[in-house]
Amino acid sequence: MSNISPYTRVIADCLESISDAKPGESDYEVRQATQLLINMLQGRMLEHIKQRVSSYYKIEPEALTEEFSVSLIEVFAEIFGLFRNKFEEMPWLVKEIAKRIVEVETRNGSKTERRINQLYLSIFCKYFEYKNIEKIISTLQTDPRIQHAIIAAIPVAAQTRPELSQAYARS
């Protein structure tokens, strides 16, 4: 699990602690672990979107500042409201999505990035009724705070590269 997201590692740990809970153990502890699991799922989804945006603009994810992350959280507030409502309606869904993320992201082999992209697309489509993750990303690009963070992350030298200039112009 060397190149695995820290979020995915915590998700795996939460799943393990929830499954290790014995009958009669504190329900409070299980609820706490489940709440942490939900927060980590949201964090991992945001991290995935950040990776997709940085890949699209050919910039390092670390170059996107805290401003970008905060803006992303604000833009996704509505989606995550739906996310939490779904989990209240279907508590089993938390563990199902978490297990799937851990399974796909820890699997070795080629085409891992493609499988991960497909996984998040299917999660957004199947459970949150967002049919096109590219549309989500393009919506993000219209937010002025996110645009500013992306522009600030593109190195000056890279802005002179034609393929980056075209991507920059589309935002």
Image (cartoon, rainbow, N blue to C red):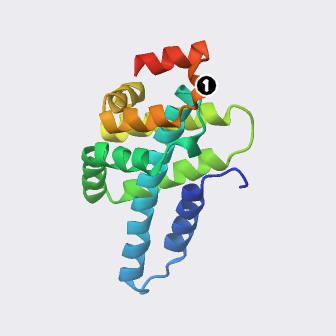
Image coordinates for residue 27, horizontal then vertical, percent: 37, 81
Tell me the element at label 1.
Answer: helix
The part of the image, by quadrant, that contains residue 124 is: top left
Image coordinates for residue 15, horizontal then vertical, percent: 52, 65
Vertical relation: 76 (above or below) 31: above
Image coordinates for residue 73, horizontal then vertical, percent: 35, 49
Frontmost residue, 49 versus 127: 49
Vertical relation: 155 (above or below) 27: above
Frontmost residue, 48 versus 121: 48
Vertical relation: 74 (above or below) 148: below
Q: Residue at x 40, y 60 (%)?
A: 38
Q: Hey, what amino acid is under mark 1?
A: Ala
Numbered disc total: 1
Image coordinates for residue 35, horizontal then vertical, percent: 38, 67
Q: Residues within 10 Å of mark 1 (few under 14, many from 20)?
A: some
Q: Residue at x 60, y 44 (%)?
A: 104
Which image quarter holds the C terminus? Answer: top left
Determine which residue is flagged by label 1: 158
On the rendered structure, is 43 left or right of 103? Answer: left
On the rendered structure, is 50 left or right of 81? Answer: right
Q: Residue at x 46, y 59 (%)?
A: 40
Judged from this view, the residue extending furthest toward the front is 156
Which image quarter holds the N terminus? Answer: bottom right
Q: Residue at x 52, y 70 (%)?
A: 19
